[in-house]
């Protein structure tokens, strides 16, 4: 609030030129008010000294705040200070935005709090997220303070990843969002200020690869040839084919979890899980020799870590002339085969251990193919019966 203007008061544009004039002196000091900023004035004392000041009404009382002498404080700075003081008085009593103190850089933040944040992640998730931070996020935001990163910065980062780095961005942005969420919990950012919120990811064409009957035969023949030299790797591949399990669930399998006709996993990607074993899968497990120095079903030479199946698979698939078949495609093919055998989607979801129906729904188009093929067979039979085709 500012005092009411008086008609008799002297007014002028209070700038540097006016302050350098020789103003008339009187026995008592008098004031000259600015014509643009109400409340901003120049006080002229009998001694010949001029002072900038601002007058306001704060909580029902009039106050006059001296800003400084004209020969020590420029007119522009005095006007800016007066404007700030008047604004603060006008906003007094209103809710204020929380002030975030100086925060560490993203690199220092991650070094200090990564262990606390990653405690709720699985080891594989922790490794993947650390790689995303180290290779994708740190080069861009490592030297920026936690509270200084805004949505426009994330948009520029996203635009810079267009093309070959789109997959890296899609994997890294959830990690960066988790870091900001933890920073909010530590009061290093204002609540709800996560700049990654609502940030769209790049749309990628899903890669769905299903084995054909001929490819199944080629893999089966190659597995029989490799069984003598690499029995453990062959057993893992067969269990993946027969169960549709994830490769990590089979590689890290322990004997205590083997309870035919099922595998009872205390933890998996979706939590505790039961994998049902058909007759072929039970025969594979029955043929594995158990080592006394390891609780793992498929240990490496030391018996302390799981077998390195991934490297063997990359070489094996080339021998089968199937260089584009990923390990996870065996899981997709398991679902495809179940669809072809008219197994309901809900049952397939339980076999694969899906928590959400939407996850299994991506195989629905395969069911449409089965129905279409059946309709073609029926229509063919009807056409032959009525004499349209021989």
Image: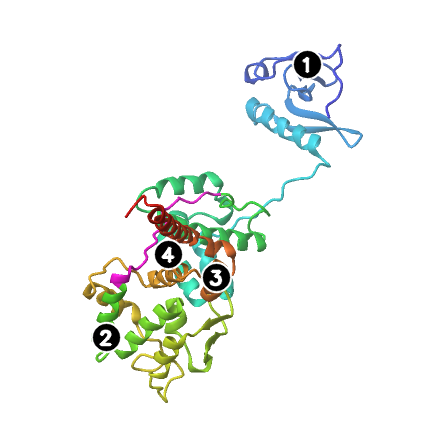
Q: Secondary structure at mark 2?
A: helix
Q: Is residue 74 visible?
A: no
Which mark sits nearer the N-terminus, 1 or 4? Answer: 1
> Tags 1 and 2 in contact by the CB under 8 Å rule?
no
> Tags 1 and 4 in contact by the CB under 8 Å rule?
no
Magenta-tinted stretch = 199-215
Which of label 3 and label 1 is nearer to you? 3
Q: Which residue is mark 4?
A: 134
Which mark sits nearer the N-terminus, 1 or 2? Answer: 1
Name the image quarter holding residue 175: bottom left
Left or right: residue 344 versus residue 185 is left
Depth check, front residue: 155 or 105:
155
Q: Which mark is residue 349?
A: 3
State the image coordinates of residue 165 (x, y, percent, origin top left). Answer: 33, 47
Crowd tier of the residue under label 4, counting other residues whose Cα lies within 10 Å: few below 14, some 14–19, many 20 or above: few
Depth check, front residue: 328 or 139:
328
């Amino acid at each position: 609030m500012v005092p009411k203007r008086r008609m008799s008061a002297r007014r002028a544009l209070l700038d540097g030129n006016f302050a350098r004039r020789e103003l008339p002196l009187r026995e008592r000091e008098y004031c000259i008010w600015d014509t643009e900023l109400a409340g901003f004035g120049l006080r002229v004392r009998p001694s010949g000294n001029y002072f900038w000041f601002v007058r306001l009404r704060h909580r029902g009382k009039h106050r006059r705040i001296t800003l400084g002498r004209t020969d020590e404080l420029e007119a522009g700075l005095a006007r800016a200070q007066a404007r700030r003081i008047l604004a603060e008085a006008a906003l007094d009593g209103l809710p204020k935005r929380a002030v975030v103190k100086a925060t560490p850089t993203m690199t220092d933040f991650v070094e200090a709090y990564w262990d606390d944040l990653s405690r709720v992640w699985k080891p594989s998730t922790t490794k993947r997220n650390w790689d995303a931070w180290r290779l994708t996020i740190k080069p861009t935001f490592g030297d920026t303070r936690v509270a200084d990163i805004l949505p426009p910065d994330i948009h520029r980062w996203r635009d810079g990843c267009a093309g070959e780095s789109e997959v890296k961005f899609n994997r890294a942005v959830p990690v960066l969002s988790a870091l900001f969420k933890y920073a909010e919990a530590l009061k290093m950012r204002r609540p709800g200020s996560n700049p990654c919120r609502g940030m769209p990811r790049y749309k990628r064409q899903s890669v769905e690869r299903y084995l054909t009957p001929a490819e199944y035969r080629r893999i089966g023949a190659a597995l029989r040839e490799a069984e003598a030299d690499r029995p453990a790797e062959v057993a893992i591949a067969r269990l993946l084919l027969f169960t549709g399990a994830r490769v990590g669930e089979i590689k890290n399998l322990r004997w205590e979890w083997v309870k035919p006709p099922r595998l009872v996993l205390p933890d998996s990607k979706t939590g505790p899980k039961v994998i049902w074993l058909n007759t072929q899968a039970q025969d594979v497990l029955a043929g594995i020799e158990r080592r006394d120095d390891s609780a793992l079903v498929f240990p490496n030479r030391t018996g302390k870590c799981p077998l390195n199946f991934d490297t063997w698979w990359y070489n094996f698939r080339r021998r089968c002339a199937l260089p584009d078949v990923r390990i996870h495609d065996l899981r997709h093919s398991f679902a495809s085969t179940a669809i072809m055998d008219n197994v309901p989607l809900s049952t397939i979801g339980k076999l694969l251990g899906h928590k959400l129906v939407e996850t299994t729904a991506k195989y629905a188009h395969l069911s449409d193919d089965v129905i279409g093929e059946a309709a073609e067979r029926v229509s063919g039979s009807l056409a032959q019966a009525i004499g349209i085709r021989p």
